[in-house]
Image: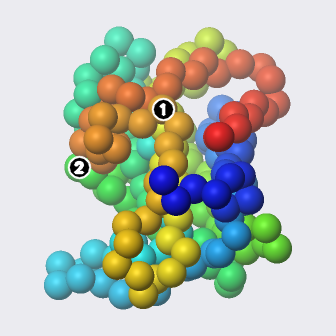
């Protein structure tokens, strides 16, 4: 209800791949960028409830395993908050995220919002099914959280592209989009 149009919050997702890595970039248009503070709760988990953040979810299991809704080895779900320093606060979510090694992320705050870039290594340890070739399906989802005032008790706005029921991407892959790797150099999807 509080969304004021694309200048308030909108995004474009770019994806490219090569044999050893998946590259993702999310360009977010946001009128007020609020970075995560880095504060943690009593369990040592970084708090993301009062900041802007992007959650990316990836299912790189073998195609015949992608019907499983639970996240397990070969899936990845992480939340990233932008930072002016370029060093984002990245928090893997869910049960399977700890198995993904070597993820590199960077952010850039811009005059109109922020950009988040990620490189996810397509190694056998991260994705045992391998098969990284043309026509291989993967599943992908994107959630963007927008907080215009970290002191406000109002809930953040959240926008999503192919999201699991009740926005529970860290528990359920059923809403994620199935994409097929191609020879194209990049593809983009616009959010509303």
Looking at the image, residue 105 lies above or below residue 148: above
Task: Name the residue located 75 percent from the left edge and 31 percent from the top edge.
Answer: 187
How busy is the neighbourhood of tag 1: few (under 14 within 10 Å), some, or many (20 plus)? some
Q: How many marks?
A: 2
Q: Can see residue 113? A: yes
Task: Name the residue located 62 percent from the left edge and 52 percent from the top edge.
Answer: 119
Numbered badge on residue 105: none
According to the picture, the residue beneath numbered tag 1 turns out to be 162
Q: Of 30 and 46, which appears nearest the observer?
A: 30
Q: Position of residue 71 (x, y in %)?
A: 27, 38
According to the picture, the residue beneath numbered tag 2 turns out to be 95
First of labels 2, 1 by sequence position: 2
Q: Position of residue 131 (x, y in %)?
A: 52, 20
Looking at the rendered image, the disc whose residue lies closer to the viewer, 2 or 1, is: 1
Q: Position of residue 155 (x, y in %)?
A: 37, 67
- Image quadrant of residue 176? top left
Task: Name the residue located 53 percent from the left edge and 37 percent from the top edge.
Answer: 161
- Image quadrant of residue 66? top left
Q: From the viewer's perspective, tell me whether residue 160 is left or right of residue 27.
A: left
- Which scheme is used to colour this image of the protein? rainbow
- Image quadrant of residue 3? bottom right
């Amino acid at each position: 209800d509080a969304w004021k149009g694309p200048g308030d919050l909108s995004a474009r997702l770019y994806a490219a791949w090569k044999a050893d890595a998946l590259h993702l970039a999310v360009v977010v248009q946001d009128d007020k960028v609020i970075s995560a503070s880095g504060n943690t709760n009593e369990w040592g988990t970084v708090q993301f409830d009062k900041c802007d953040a992007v959650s990316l979810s990836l299912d790189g299991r073998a195609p015949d395993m992608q019907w499983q809704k639970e996240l397990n080895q070969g899936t990845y779900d992480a939340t990233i908050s932008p930072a002016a320093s370029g060093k984002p606060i990245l928090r893997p979510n869910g049960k399977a995220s700890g198995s993904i090694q070597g993820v590199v992320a960077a952010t850039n705050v811009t005059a109109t919002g922020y950009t988040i870039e990620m490189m996810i290594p397509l190694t056998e340890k991260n994705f045992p099914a391998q098969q990284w070739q043309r026509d291989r399906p993967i599943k992908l989802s994107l959630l963007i959280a927008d907080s215009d005032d970290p002191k406000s008790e109002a809930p953040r706005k959240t926008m999503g592209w192919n999201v699991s029921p009740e926005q529970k991407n860290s528990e359920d892959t059923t809403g994620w989009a199935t994409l097929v790797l191609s020879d194209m150099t990049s593809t983009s999807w616009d959010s509303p």
